[in-house]
Image (cartoon, rainbow, N blue to C red):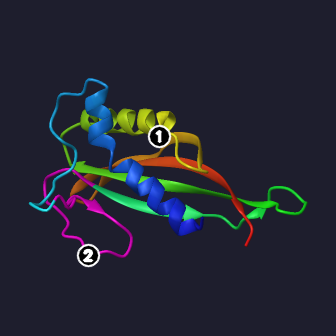
Amino acid sequence: MTEFDIQDELFETFLTLDTFASSQGYTGESYFDTDTQGNVLNVHFPNKPFDYPENKLWFDLTFINNEPVDAAIMQGAQARYTGVLYIDIFTPNDVGEDECAAIYSWIAMLFHSVNIDDVDIMQVYISTKGNEADHYRLQVAVVWEADIDKE
């Protein structure tokens, strides 16, 4: 497993948000816009083309990892990787915080309840929030760590 594998696992987990929320009783509209092939249109992934939607909900994902440290000193030891997945939730200005707050709650419940191979979710919290230009932004931090075999 590499940092990119961890990133992929966390991104894939985030994309299960609609399914998770529905399984917990959410009956509102989908948080994700998709095209006819099922591709998510309102999530900006790192270094991928993206058309920024106007006056509607969208997300931006940023994956940051720290330098690994030794998890143990012995043969077959692992390296401990830590980092943060930032999920920025964007809504139009002047519509209040209710939608962002609800999405944040679902994201926190999702990441606290899911089992991701070799990745432990340590914390989920609101990192920053506020109005920016033509949208409102709430940033969710998902703090993770993983012990990975040294290669």
On screen, 101 above or below 149? above
Is most of the magenta stretch helix, strand or loop? loop
Q: Measured from the top left, where is residue 77 in percent x and y?
A: 82, 60
Point out which mark residue 150 bears.
Answer: none
On screen, 126 above or below 113? below
Q: Measured from the top left, where is residue 114 in percent x and y?
A: 48, 38
Identify the magenta region.
38-58
Check disc 1 and report the residue beneath it: 111
Asked if the residue under mark 1 is in contact with the one under mark 2, i.e. CB atoms within 8 Å, the reply is no
Question: Which amino acid lies under the numbered mark 1 shown in the image of this protein?
Answer: Phe
Helix or strand or loop: what does disc 1 sit on?
helix
Quadrant of the image occupied by residue 65:
bottom right
In the shown orientation, is residue 113 left or right of residue 38?
right
Disc 1 crowd, CA 10 A, few/some/many (<14, 14-19, 20+): many
Q: CA distance from mark 2 to mark 1?
A: 26 Å
- Write the residue at 16% across / 53% down: 33
Check disc 2 and report the residue beneath it: 49
Of residues 66 and 88, which is closer to you in this image?
Answer: 66
In the shown orientation, is residue 142 left or right of residue 97?
right
On screen, 46 above or below 25? below
- Mark nearer the N terminus (2 vs 1): 2
- Write the residue at 8% across / 60% down: 36
In the shown orientation, is residue 100 left or right of residue 52?
right
In this view, which residue lies farthest toward the front? 76
| Quadrant in which the N terminus is drawn | bottom right
| Quadrant in which the C terminus is drawn | bottom right
Disc 2 crowd, CA 10 A, few/some/many (<14, 14-19, 20+): few
Of residues 96 and 62, which is closer to you in this image?
Answer: 62
